[in-house]
């Protein structure tokens, strides 16, 4: 037990902060569980949203938004991960020319700091130009593109998922001891072989962490979905959308995710069905949580037996 | 000569006989060498004048002297046959020059020890021999390093091939975070698209581990992570890994400084065994170690090569005052 008063204040202050944070987070989770579980049943998880009465605007379940979240997260990550890894390798292993490294560093920080709705707006501006019509579909009257599709949304989602992937991979790269790189160079290995075989195995946990954070950002983003995917909560996808011949059309069309569903169903949105918002929020929470644990495990798998 | 039959001589008669034999071998090979050189006049300029004048004679003379330390090991067929010849090597990082024009010879098959106080440039010198120096962005290198009379800083050098010919073992054991097998196999696998199978690599991996004296300790558990081995084992694994690339020259940067005395002894033994089949250049802080394993020694001070020659001469009868002081432990 610290003896001096200032030490004591510091000690109890730190202790109290930990306790406070833990209770707030667990409070939110408990509250979400209580309110969410009450509203989740089999039908909620297996039917599409549908228009409700005049007072309560949304009925049915969350299948379409759930699928929307899964697809947009998968697409966004698929674009962001290779791009992020290569950027991190550039920053962490090469870093030349210097102006490009500094520029990239600044760009990553900017993306981190700028709210996603700004990117959504920017996306809307460029993806709606007629030359970008291949990403969404054409507006018959004007010849412009709708700029609302899984492709449009996924591209901007990839952008906001980049910073955590780059930073966490870069941090892991800087932890790899230089002597190991030198050992590989001393065996006559090329830079690429060194990165692939020596650096990469050591940074897997860092990549996994970054990917989790990036996926969390995508799954949790509302602004980009609302603007670039459409808030089409009450429009279920066409039957058979998942069949190979229809899937590309599906990706060119509008959709919704759990976040837009939560917004729409909450008393703030048009759906005005609080219970359904809680239910969807809990499902989103559970999804992100499961991905977190699964990827965390994957990243920690050891090489060889210890 | 075979590296396996270098048991230390036991009596004077045996010693004398060995010296005789050696002298004959030496004469024969140097004649042969001289004939070879004469046919290529360009080679004479750079290689034919070893810095170590009269090395052979000095070494033989010492061998015959009963009071002298052990004779030079019989790794070196011909002291004038140089695996590496360094000529006018200057290295600087940014504005500070670390090496001010070094001339140094490493006779083929021998163990050459680089000694000198901290910061004298011996590690930089070593790292310049397989061009690791230039990994530092500010490094500037001037002069020649002739490996089999080809300048390794020449324009057409394949850097990756060079580093396979001139392998390196580092101060800190630095196995890769892979299995024992993969650590050694990594050195052999070319960066080809078709990956050789484990079975096809096994003989080479076994041979390398065998040469590093590690095979019997690890043969039942090759899939174990290399990081779970002891420090001494890790260092021998690093040696095995380097040997797997079948280098002509083995550079060692204080390979034992992170190890306990027992592991150190094993590695010293290994170095002596390996010499002959390849040329060893070792940087060491440990003068006793240099005396135990070196055939030749070079003393560096503040980026200048002060003196080089047979190890006995450097350690027992140095020509320069600063070498004498260093060897006597007056500074270091």
Image: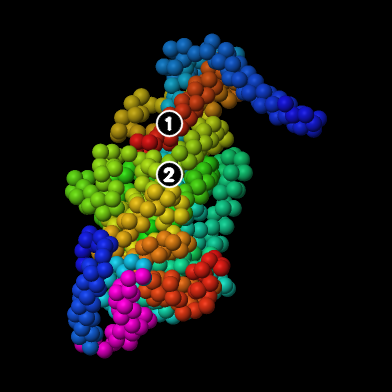
Q: Which residue is mark 2?
A: A202
Q: Is residue B49 magenta?
A: yes
Q: Secondary structure at mark 2?
A: helix
Q: Nearer the viewer, residue B35 or A112?
A: B35
Residue B126 point in image, percent of width and height = 42, 67
Q: Residue at x 29, y 57 (%)?
A: B243
Q: Residue at x 36, y 70 (%)?
A: B67
Q: Is residue B89 magenta?
A: no
Quarter of the figure that contains the N terminus of chain B: bottom left
Of the two numbered discs 2 and 1 in the rendering, the one whose residue sits closer to the viewer: 2
In the displayed structure image, the side of residue B241 where residue A21 appears, left or right: right
Task: Give the distance between the C-alpha atoms of the residues marked 2 and 1, in whole angstroms.
Answer: 15 Å
Q: Residue at x 62, y 44 (%)?
A: A113
User: Where are the magenta residues, as a range?
Assistant: B39-67
Q: Is residue B23 above or below residue A154?
A: below
Q: Is residue B175 above or below residue B140?
A: above
Q: Which residue is mark 1?
A: A297
Q: Secondary structure at mark 1?
A: helix
Residue B236 point in image, percent of width and height = 34, 51
């Amino acid at each position: 037990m610290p003896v001096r008063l200032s030490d004591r204040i510091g000690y109890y202050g730190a202790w109290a902060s930990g306790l406070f944070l833990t209770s707030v987070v667990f409070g939110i989770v408990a509250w979400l569980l209580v309110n969410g579980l009450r509203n989740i049943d089999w039908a909620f998880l297996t039917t599409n949203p549908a228009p409700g009465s005049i007072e309560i605007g949304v009925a049915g379940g969350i299948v379409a938004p759930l699928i929307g979240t899964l697809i947009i997260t998968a697409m966004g990550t698929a674009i962001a991960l290779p791009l992020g890894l290569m950027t991190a390798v550039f920053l962490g292993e090469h870093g030349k020319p210097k102006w490009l490294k500094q520029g990239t560093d600044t760009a990553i920080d900017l993306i981190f700091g700028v709210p996603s709705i700004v990117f959504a707006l920017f996306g809307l501006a460029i993806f709606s130009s007629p030359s970008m019509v291949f990403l969404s579909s054409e507006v018959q009257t004007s010849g412009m593109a709708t700029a609302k599709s899984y492709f449009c949304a996924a591209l901007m989602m990839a952008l906001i998922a980049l910073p955590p992937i780059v930073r966490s991979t870069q941090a892991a790269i800087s932890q790899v001891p230089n002597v190991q790189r030198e050992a590989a160079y001393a065996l006559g290995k090329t830079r690429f072989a060194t990165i692939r075989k020596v650096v990469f195995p050591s940074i897997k946990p860092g990549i996994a962490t970054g990917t989790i954070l990036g996926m969390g950002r995508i799954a949790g983003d509302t602004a980009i979905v609302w603007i670039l995917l459409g808030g089409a909560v009450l429009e279920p996808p066409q039957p058979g959308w998942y069949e190979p011949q229809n899937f590309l059309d599906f990706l060119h069309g509008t959709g919704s995710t759990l976040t837009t569903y939560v917004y729409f169903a909450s008393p703030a949105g048009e759906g005005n069905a609080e219970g359904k918002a809680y239910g969807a929020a809990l499902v989103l929470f559970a999804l992100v949580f499961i991905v977190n644990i699964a990827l965390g495990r994957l990243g920690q798998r050891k090489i060889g037996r210890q | 000569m075979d590296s396996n039959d270098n048991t230390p001589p036991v009596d004077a008669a045996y010693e004398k006989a060995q010296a005789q034999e050696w002298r004959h071998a030496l004469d024969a090979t140097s004649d042969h060498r001289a004939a070879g050189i004469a046919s290529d006049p360009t080679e004479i300029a750079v290689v034919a004048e070893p810095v170590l004048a009269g090395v052979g004679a000095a070494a033989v003379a010492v061998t015959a002297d009963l009071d002298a330390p052990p004779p030079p090991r019989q790794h070196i067929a011909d002291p004038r046959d140089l695996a590496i010849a360094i000529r006018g090597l200057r290295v600087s990082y940014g504005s500070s020059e670390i090496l001010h024009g070094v001339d140094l010879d490493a006779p083929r098959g021998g163990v050459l020890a680089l000694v000198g106080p901290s910061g004298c440039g011996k590690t930089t010198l070593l790292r310049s021999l397989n061009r690791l120096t230039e990994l530092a962005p500010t490094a500037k290198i001037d002069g020649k390093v002739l490996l089999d009379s080809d300048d390794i800083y020449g324009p057409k050098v394949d850097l990756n091939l060079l580093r396979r010919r001139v392998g390196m073992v580092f101060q800190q054991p630095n196995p890769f975070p892979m299995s024992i097998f993969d650590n050694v196999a990594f050195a052999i696998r070319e960066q080809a698209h078709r990956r050789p199978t484990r079975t096809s690599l096994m003989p080479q991996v076994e041979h390398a581990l065998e040469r590093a004296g590690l095979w019997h300790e690890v043969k039942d558990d090759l899939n174990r992570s290399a990081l779970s081995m002891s420090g001494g084992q890790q260092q021998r694994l690093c040696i095995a890994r380097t040997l797997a690339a079948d280098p002509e020259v083995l550079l060692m940067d204080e390979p034992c400084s992170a190890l306990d005395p027992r592991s150190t002894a094993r590695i010293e033994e290994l170095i002596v065994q390996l010499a002959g089949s390849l040329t060893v250049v070792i940087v060491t802080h440990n003068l006793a170690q240099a005396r135990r394993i070196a055939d030749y020694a070079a003393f560096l001070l503040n980026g200048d090569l002060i003196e080089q020659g047979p190890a006995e001469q450097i350690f027992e009868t140095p020509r320069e005052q600063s070498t004498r002081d260093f060897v006597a432990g007056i500074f270091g």
